[in-house]
Amino acid sequence: MSCFKSKYQDELIANAAYIGTPGKGILAADESTGTIGKRLASINVENVETNRRILRELLFTAPGCVECLSGVILFEETLYQKTAAGVPFVDVLKKGGVLPGIKVDKGTVELAGTNGETTTQGLDDLGQRCKKYYEAGARFAKWRAVLKIGPNEPSPLAIHENAYGLARYAVICQENGLVPIVEPEILSDGPHDIQKCADVTERVLAACYKALNDHHALLEGTLLKPNMVTPGSESARVAAAVIAEHTVRALLRTVPPAVPAIVFLSGGQSEEEATVNLNAMNQLKGKKPWSLTFSYGRALQQSTLKAWGGKDENIPKAQVALLVRCKANSQATLGTYKGDAKSDGASESLHVKDYKY
Amino acid sequence: MSHFKGKYHDELIANAAYIGTPGKGILAADESTGTIGKRLASINVENVESNRRALRELLFTAPGALQYLSGVILFEETLYQSTASGKPFVELLKEAGVLPGIKVDKGTVELAGTDGETTTQGLDGLGQRCAKYYEAGARFAKWRAVLKIGPNEPSELSIHENAYGLARYAVICQENGLVPIVEPEILVDGPHDIHKCAAVTERVLAACYKALNDHHVLLEGTLLKPNMVTPGSKSAKVSPQVVAEHTVRALQRTVPAAVPAVVFLSGGQSEEEASVNLNAINQVKGKKPWSLSFSFGRALQQSTLKAWGGKEENVKKAQEALLVRAKANSEATLGTYKGNSQLGEGASESLHVENYKY
């Protein structure tokens, strides 16, 4: 085998496969303190620990939602928080059959000599951190690499650095019992068409899997979190079926069948868009040797956040809003979503230029 | 799309998919003049053009055999030969629904500074040659890269050179309407175990698909011809199920599902071994998003050659021997091969030749 022999081998394979269970997906609730601050500000809520705790409790105890989720990605602070009644969040999740995950990267820094391209940091002492997170109950991790499309971007340097950073992170996770989500996000910012996005996505994913192979990662114990293949944010829209076709084709050309599941990021897509596109992919005929599911942050929480508005009395309403999106996305993983989910603000674009979180 | 936009796009995809039709596979009859000479010598037949022609006619007109073949790889000389009654071989094959293929590499040369590792030549003027072959009726091509397992082998240099040579050849083929068979053969020679072979195979295949992506190759219009994952020739044998499990796993870890078919080489395996292993591969449970078929040379022709012995009166008998192996391998692609009680003479003989060159 080209992969290293981890003592967690069987567990990694089982957990990665579980996350890809048809009908389930991931809630990305791992916004850093700074980023969640912006969300809270948009509904006039103060960015203090209690409010962050309340929001996450709202999400994790929303009735009916855990059935639709195989995993939730947490920020470090949240991994150690509890419900008001004192039950650790990781226990709430585990009891609901949801694997806790942990964001382990430390954000992006610019690559000197490039036009604003970045690499992601967080490798220092990552092994010890992963070990600690495993002890706290985490079973998977996430690391976001970011690339952009431009006249000279992504450059060979950006592709190489981000691919090899992801691969190094992945193997360190596996050494410590965490399934690594490999996330090479290609931002949708720009006037380029869908062909350009497809071209870049295929090139970036090919580089990622070469890097993973070089680093001896166990592919059966990893997940991929890619962007869908879409036109740029400043380019004309296309139908969901077109997005689905280009996306699945790009994956067929680059992602080895050993990878058990692909959990799409939603980028700047609205809640409804993200669901409809995922649904179209699962309806596509042809080879799809991995589960195709979701790992959504904004596209699962937007209407919930609005419904809550920071008020206790709105919690049940907000939790219903979350259930609506969870159910819709669960159906989308089965290709059975009828487009009838009723959410307030579900069609609002969530695109933020040059998004950092 | 990361692949180049060629005018043969749809045709390449259709032909590559056709070659992977369940129940069919490839007869590799592309032995160079030197290599076929050794085969003929082993049955005391003179290595002259008419004998080479007679042998290939025997193969291509074997009653009932062509239905189990989706392609035949030819050496350049054979591409332009005809039956005794004057029918061009390419026409004969096409009429029977068999795509003619052509070997386009020009053999291996040693890489200086390595311990006997090689790279493959043949890129010079390859475009024009492919265009010519397409006009003559060829629809796919083959290029054999060779790697070996040793204490320091395969080296980074050897993997890189062979992978990028294969990718360059592949794109040139596609520009000229030929589906490229990508063949990175890792020789079985050595005392290493199956795990070592698996690790090397995965590393080599990952390098090949990175190179193909770099070169903008249309994967849906290619085929892969890899070695099966087995213990080394000087190591203890394992069961077909173990070979099958390691082989399929290696492919799952490296071969994108866009590739329509994997057509295994037989290496030094006997006719029966090759069929039984291919059968086990098709019986493995799990993800197999590409057809798993054969591209056998020695493992399809061994008993046929022995039965023929160069004698006209033996042609019928020899053709029956070919039919037996063709049918066996066809069943193996469906996972329904039961093992052959009617083994032709030599069907269980190992065909391993150390450091095989052909």
Image (spheres, coloured by chain):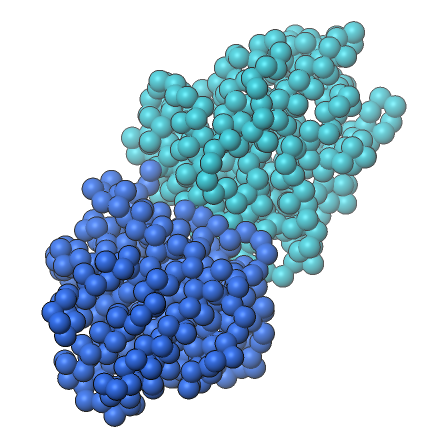
Chain colours: A cyan, B blue
The location of residue B308, given as percent across then percent down, is 29, 85
- Which quadrant would residue A299 be assigned to in this image? top right
Quadrant of the drawing holding the C terminus of chain A: top right
Numbered circles on residues, count? 0
Where residue A160 appears, as percent x and y from the top left, is: 41, 46
Identify the residue at horizontal 28%, vertical 54% (top origin).
B179
Q: Nearer the viewer, residue B56 or B101?
A: B56
- For the question of whether residue B226 can be seen, the reply is no
Compare residues A180 and B241 and report the one nearer the observer: B241
The residue shown at (51%, 31%) is: A283
Q: Is residue B231 left or right of residue B318?
A: right
Where B325 falls versus A75 (above or below)?
Answer: below
Q: Quadrant of the N terminus of chain A?
A: bottom right
Above or below A284: residue B75: below
Q: Position of residue A25 (x, y in %)?
A: 63, 32
| Left or right placement of residue B325 versus residue B234 in this view | left
The answer to whether any part of residue A68 appears in the image is yes
The residue at the point 35 percent across, 47 percent down is B220
Image position of A324 (left or right of A143): right
Q: Note whether B200 is above or below B268 in the view shown.
A: above
Residue B47: x percent and y percent?
18, 86
At 55% from the left edge and 36% from the top edge, which residue is drawn?
A: A292
